[in-house]
Amino acid sequence: MKIESVSLQGSDGSSYTPPSTLNEINVTPMVDVMLVLLVIFMVSAPLMQQGVQVDLPKTDSPSLSEQEEQIVLVVNRNGSIEINKNPIPINDLRKKLHMLYKDKRKKEIFIQSDQTVPYGKVATVMSQVQLAGIKKIGLVTEPRKK
């Protein structure tokens, strides 16, 4: 099979030869993109598995036994509040807790706070929890290393 080149002649006498077709696919750009995506996923995958880092205070109290459907309220280092990993503004905390506990028979909550959070912030959160009708409040700690 013979491929002939076609030459076109313009009205002004100039000639134009279209480029011949490329029979191969250039995979170099595709490999570059795939390598960049691989690096992005390798860097971001460990970040997606990490939770919120909270430096818990150390105590000598025994750990509690596992109970069903515990609700954990977290006060982060920056003072933000989360309930079961859902951020909640302090102004909406009482309403949200009231909605969560309105059908529950056992009204107890666990507060997990970073030890660097000011005591006043934790006290404010605890008062909002009590105003929502929750009387059993547990503070989450880590056991001391002996």
Image (cartoon, rainbow, N blue to C red):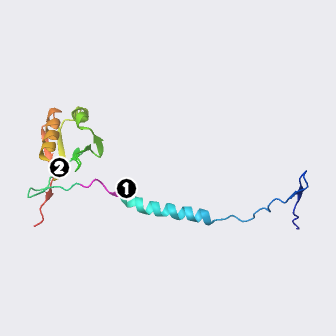
Relative placement, left or right, of 114 versus 30 is: left
The image quadrant where one finds the C terminus is bottom left
Relative side of 71 to 6, left or right: left
The total of numbered circles placed on residues is: 2
* In the foreground, 103 or 129: 129
Say which residue appears at 64% left-offset and 65% top-offset: 27
Q: Which mark is residue 106?
A: none
Q: Residue at x 16, y 51 (%)?
A: 140
As drawn, is 109 to the left or to the right of 8? left
Question: Which residue is outermost to the left?
Answer: 60
Q: Amino acid at mark 1?
A: Met
Quadrant location, the N terminus: bottom right
- What is the magenta segment's predominant secondary structure? loop
Mark sitting on residue 48: 1
Q: Is residue 11 magenta?
A: no
Q: Quadrant of residue 32?
A: bottom right
Range covered by the magenta-colored residues: 48-53
Judged from the image, the secondary structure of the residue bearing numbered disc 1 is helix
Which structural element holds mark 2?
Answer: loop
Residue 98 x %, y %: 22, 32
Is any part of residue 70 visible from this angle?
A: no
Q: Nearer the viewer, mark 1 or mark 2?
A: 2
Query: Percent position (x, y) of residue 14?
Result: 88, 57
- The residue pinned by badge 2 equals 117
> Callout 1: 10 Å neighbours few (<14), some, many (20+)?
few
